[in-house]
Amino acid sequence: MIHLASRGAYGVPRVHAELRHQGRAVNRKKVERIMRERGITGITRRRRRCLTRQARKPVFAPDLIGRDFTAPRPGMRLVGDMTFLPTEEGWLYLATCIDLATREVVGYAMADHHRAELPVAALRMAAGRGGLERGCISHSDRGSEGGFN
């Protein structure tokens, strides 16, 4: 009944917790066995989204900053990342470039996709504002769309 009331979402852990909440002393393994025998399983309604996907062919760029996320002066080291924002019209993707010395966003770009053009546009904005030193390092995670290592 608990499984049906959850519209099929509750699996063993939640069914067991609900039975305990109702004051019924029941072993978790017993709940698991009964649900397995009757073919009852929970479902996941939401798919977890993650923007960082490793490239199919690994192209490893050297870690030029060596996990040291500081900079002595502005314009020497940038870090970049992407995130997504839910809107009424669908997902909006945001790519940012942050200066490690000032912790300011020095470049950003938004689009309805998260292809390589997006972080490249953010990096171009950062470069277009001026203030980047010759040999400036731009660092990001190893996502396949990032291309900004």
Image (spheres, rainbow, N blue to C red):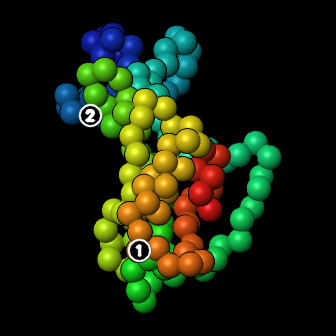
Most extreme residue toward the left, as rendered? Answer: 22
Q: Which residue occupies 58% across, 50% down?
A: 146
User: Which residue in the protein does label 2 denote?
Assistant: 20
Q: Which residue occupies 49% across, 55% down?
A: 124
**Percent position of residue 147, x then y:** 63, 52
**Percent position of residue 44, x then y:** 44, 24
Q: Quadrant of residue 26?
A: top left
**Could you tell me which secondary element the residue under label 2 belongs to?**
helix
User: Which residue in the protein does label 1 denote?
Assistant: 131
Q: Which residue occupies 52% across, 11% down?
A: 38
Q: In which quarter of the image is residue 149?
A: bottom right
* Camera sees residue 10: no
Most extreme residue toward the bottom, as rendered? Answer: 72
Q: Nearer the viewer, residue 77 or 16?
A: 77
In the depicted structure, whether residue 25 falls above or below residue 3? below
Q: Which of 96 and 67 is in front in this view?
A: 96
